[in-house]
Image (cartoon, rainbow, N blue to C red):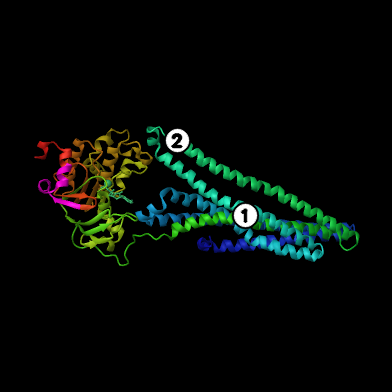
Amino acid sequence: MMRLFRFLKPFIWPVFFIVIFMFFQAMAELYLPTLMSDVVNNGMMKGNTGYILKYGSYMLLVAAGSSACSIVGSFLSARVAVGFGRDLRSKVFTRVESYSLHEFDKIGTASLITRTTNDITQIQTVLVMMLRFIIYAPIMCVGGIIMAVSKDKELTLILAVVVPLLLAVIGTLASIVVPLFKALQKKLDRVNLVLRENLTGIRVIRAFNRLDIERKRFVEANKDLTDTSIRVNKIMAAMQPLLMVFMNITSVAIIWFAGLRINANKMELGDMMAFLQYAMQIMFAFIMVSVMYVMVPRAQASAMRINEVLDMQPEITDPAGAQSVGAKRGVVEFEDVTFSYPGAEQPAISHVTFEAKPGEVTAIIGGTGSGKSTLISLIPRFYDVDSGRILVDGVDVRELAQKELRQKIGFVPQTAVLFTGTIAENIRYGKKDATDEEVRHAAQVAQASEFINEMKNGYDSEISQGGTNVSGGQKQRLSIARALVRKPEIYIFDDSFSALDFKTDARLRAALRKETSESTVIIVAQRVSTVMDADRIIVLDEGKVVGMGSHRQLLSNCEVYREIVSSQLSEEEIA
Ligand code: ADP
Ligand code: MG
């Protein structure tokens, strides 16, 4: 929590003024009972109307000043806390954007969302209270005691009994409530998780008739959260009347003993009334401090979760003196590359060596889980290699600025991702200043223009969230168009033709060949028909290269390739 306060730096002046205003508010509130005791002792008891009017209006002024300070202080505190929340959110967001895929895997998307929203709000709420009370409560406490003693020393003994008792009561309640608050946060996480899984997996849940089970799962998580909330609130609800009873008994005790002293002419009526108010102020101050004591651990848990996000150093960063690319254009070389996912027993890629040159098509084929997607995700440096190296245009990818490296690459991922916006906007994602002509051309090559023209608004048709209003094959073609519009030096297609029918697949590849004749093309595919006419086919099996060459060469010398082929093509097609 304390560490997060470094982000309060821009608010140093408002915070300074809050402290000043809260100081004056506290002073005014401490002064009021003394003024009142003067009015009672010297005015009312002696029937001096002039005195009452004079000091009465004085009291009104002080009260007005105190209210003004309170209003300005609250206003500033709210502004500072909200501004602090805004800055913190943007800091978290920026940090998360710099994460490599490793870090995403570690924290998890759902948790990252809760941390950026709910956890930061939590801290914001506590910050408002802290700014309001951190100066005010101690002054009221110490000042109240000093003033009470100045009114009547012996009566202060009552407070010496009552305040420790009060603290004991609050302490007991807090020790029950604080762990519950912490549990509450975890239970909320759980509800979020179940809800998120349900929302994203709704089709699967329906198709497999899991609605009842999922509903039960949600009801359980929800009930768990509710039960704990109710318990916390019951205790908090009991706290208020309990404290009231406590304060009322204290009042009665003060009046009782003060009465005895007034009778004995050892005290004046006004002083008793002032003393009563000081006692209340002291007790309120203690209650405020203890409320903070309950709230802070909750914010503490949130602060820890946020710090975890901020402290995690992205594994992949730009080198200090980023190199510029060499003279070659679009050459990709793998030199004895080995890579494992963290925690995996076996490397996902081991000892892979090959070279892909401009004007050539390099195809990668292999069973599911053979490491095809992993292999190509190393080129845009989504992950860093364990050993060996990958060169793009003759320079190790770890020595290039990420921006420059990725600028060269047109990447079409295995699962097509579209963003909310129009079709044209989605294609322009590849090149933000692409002309209408370029967008249209890219769509044409990607074999997407036909279905785009059939849509009601053509290129201005809206894509819904997650791209649910286009089919899988249409999504793939749009994400291919997005890569094409960039005219990059290196094209990477990860199984991007899998949802297309054979005819569209063939037409698309023919169009691509013309379009990409000067670029390096790397195609990952499952279908032999997709890779057959590639210049070089790499056969992957369990992360190792088990064959490399043309279709014909591989047929004669690669057993794995022959198996894949014979499982897909009929005899005459092979020949
Ligand atoms: P392919 O694309 O050929 O189907 P992948 O490259 O996706 O295969 O996966 C290769 C292997 O790496 C698989 O065994 C898979 O379980 C593992 N793997 C893939 N992605 C991750 C990840 N993010 N974390 C850990 N292991 C992964
Ligand atoms: Mg894959």
> In the figure, is residue 436 to the left or right of 262?
left
Q: Quadrant of residue 420?
A: top left
Pointer 1 local density, CA inside 10 Å: few below 14, some 14–19, many at least 20: few
Q: In terms of depth relative to the viewer, which is nearer, 321 or 263?
A: 263
Provide residue 259's location: percent of width, then percent of height. Answer: 87, 57
**Residue that numbered label 1 is attached to:** 175
Report the magenta residues as a range. Answer: 545-564
Overall secondary structure of the magenta section: helix
In the picture provided, is 286 more to the left or to the right than 456?
A: right
Asked whether 557 falls inside the magenta stretch, the response is: yes
Q: Residue furthest left?
A: 575
Quadrant housing residue 172: bottom right
Q: Residue at x 23, y 62 (%)?
A: 395
Residue 260 lies, in percent from the top left, at 88, 58
Direction from residue 319 to residue 255 in the image, left or right: right
- The picture places residue 250, in percent across and down from the top left corner, at 78, 55
Q: Residue at x 48, y 50 (%)?
A: 117
Q: Secondary structure at mark 1?
A: helix
Residue 264 versus residue 565 in the image, above or below? below
Residue at mark 2: 213
